[in-house]
Amino acid sequence: MNDKIALVTGAGRGVGQAIALALGRAGAHAGTPFRVVAVDVNPDAAQRTADAIMQAGGAAAAQTVDVTNKLAVQTLIYTVLETHGRVDILVNAAHVAPGSPAIKLDEWEWNRTLDVNLKGAFLVSQTVARAMNETGGGIILNVLRPVDAAATIAVRAAREGLIGLTAALAAEWAASGIHVEILEAADPRVAAAETVQRCENRWPVSGPA
């Protein structure tokens, strides 16, 4: 994965953090300028993840963004492109999960859940895909968390929307070399390992950049 730039949203905790750390370790192991951009709405959390990657020998930077804000997302991606010139890997892991049942769920919780879990994935994907179009394609992974009996209606609705979004973008962008896929995240460690494996399959370490 020589000279590849990976951007991970929701990298400050949970599965997003596990994926960012795994990509960082992969970059350190390959001994190449493979860099992770750890993105989170919480600047301290993003920085902690980036610091952990660098302490392990990887290359990383921290960025802060609210993925529901289109202008902020565009500014973030433009900043990354100015610094690194490209984005090869995008992992959409930003996620919220309100606990209110349907009968008590207020409009703000409903909107915020769909905005972060679904709209945010679209906004970041759209902006990154425009850059990928100019640099030969890439990989976009949309993290799909498991649901159980406790999952709220907003979380379930956003999850189903993410499945549909992924299928639609995969079909539309395949001709541009942009692979859009679901990443199951029942176990953060498994999801992290799977992310690295998919990237290595796309760009073998011993193969061409």
Image (cartoon, rainbow, N blue to C red):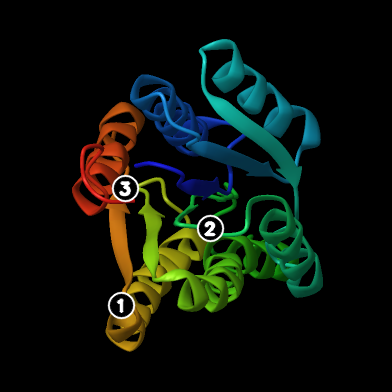
> Mark 2 or mark 1, which is nearer to you?
2
Q: Is residue 119 above or below residue 45?
A: below
Give the number of marks.
Answer: 3
Spatial distance from mark 3 to mark 2, Cα to Cα?
A: 28 Å
- Kindly identify the residue that appears in the image at 40 percent across and 64 percent down: 159
- Circle 1 sits on which residue? 170
Q: Position of residue 111 (x, y in %)?
A: 67, 70
Residue 146 marker: 3
Viewer-side residue, 19 vs 198: 198
Q: Quadrant of residue 44?
A: top right
Question: Counting other residues with Cα less than 10 Å from the Cα at mark 2, is it few (<14), some (14-19), or many (20 or more)?
Answer: many
> Mark 3 or mark 2, which is nearer to you?
2
Q: Secondary structure at mark 1?
A: helix
Q: Quadrant of residue 19?
A: top left
- Kindly identify the residue that appears in the image at 29 percent across and 63 percent down: 181
Q: Earlier in the sequence, mark 3 or mark 2?
A: 2
- Kindly identify the residue that appears in the image at 59 percent across and 52 percent down: 100
Q: Earlier in the sequence, mark 2 or mark 1?
A: 2
- Circle 2 sits on which residue? 87
Kindly identify the amino acid type of the residue bearing the numbered disc 1: Ala
Q: Position of residue 20 (x, y in %)?
A: 49, 34
Spatial distance from mark 1 to mark 3, Cα to Cα?
A: 21 Å
Q: Position of residue 80 (x, y in %)?
A: 69, 54
